[in-house]
Amino acid sequence: MAKQYPSIAPAQRQFIESQRVFFTASATADGHINLSPKGLDALRVLDAGTVAYLDLTGSGNETAAHLRADGRLTLMFCAFDGPPMILRLYGRGRVLPRGGSAYGTLLADAFGGVEPPGARQIIVLAVDLVQTSCGYGVPLLDYRAERPGLVRWAETKGEDGLAAYRREKNRVSLDGLPTGVDETADHTVV
């Protein structure tokens, strides 16, 4: 039932852009696998071969560490309403650190220059494979609202508090790999 494509077709783009949640998966050859849910209108399809998401400060920064070490990244989207479908984007990712020129340009171009509280970095995925599958096993769920907790937490911390938190909690992965969160902003992490 799975079908593969070399790039994102217009109908697939429409599907991606209509989802309220997506999942990221990354790993190194011998470390822990990371799988994280993302929401809050964070993802943009830039073109048929590129997507980006605005990554907010959280309890860890595994994806950034994995991209530095290996580069592989998969994003998965599931239809929780409407016709069933699962869509995966496979490729190589890179990190645009907050405050850097590439980050600022993409923030302006793709996100209307709006930086939500707690913004940490932008993750860019160069897509080399799109795969769709039936999604028959995905339950039907009703969307009610975004959870306000992460934004409130970031607003309460403030810029200085967030910077201190990232230095304490986001500098290394579970496996001790550097994430690049404390490097200069104009250093693009590959």
Image (cartoon, rainbow, N blue to C red):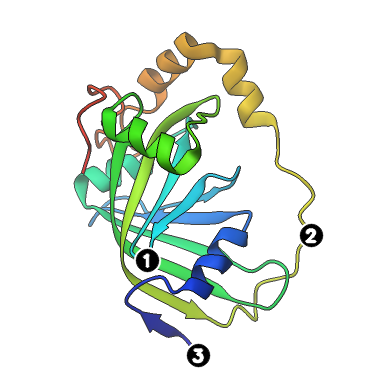
In the foreground, 178 or 83: 83
Q: Residues within 10 Å of mark 3 (few under 14, many from 20)?
A: few
Amino acid on which the number 3 mark rests in the picture: Met
Q: Is residue 61 visible?
A: no
Amino acid on which the number 2 mark rests in the picture: Asp
| Place of residue 34 in the rendered image (x, y in percent of width and height, measured from the top left) | 41, 51
- Of callouts 1 and 3, which one flags the residue occurring earlier in the amino acid sequence? 3
- Of callouts 2 and 1, which one flags the residue occurring earlier in the amino acid sequence? 1
The correct choice, above or below, for 179 with respect to 14 in the image is above
Tell me if 147 is positioned left or right of 66 in this view.
Answer: right
Tell me if 169 is positioned left or right of 1 in this view.
Answer: left
Q: Residues within 10 Å of mark 1 (few under 14, many from 20)?
A: some
The quarter of the rendered structure image containing the C terminus is: top left
In the foreground, 170 or 123: 123
* Residue on which disc 3 sits: 1
| Place of residue 29 in the rendered image (x, y in percent of width and height, measured from the top left) | 22, 57
* Residue on which disc 1 sits: 48
Residue with the most extreme top position:
160
> Marks 1 and 3: which is nearer the front?
1
Q: Secondary structure at mark 1?
A: loop
What residue is at 62 percent from the left and 22 percent from the top?
153
The correct choice, above or below, for 84 with respect to 190 in the image is below
* Residue on which disc 2 sits: 142
| Place of residue 156 in the rendered image (x, y in percent of width and height, measured from the top left) | 62, 14
What residue is at 66 percent from the left and 23 percent from the top?
152
The correct choice, above or below, for 70 with respect to 158 in the image is below
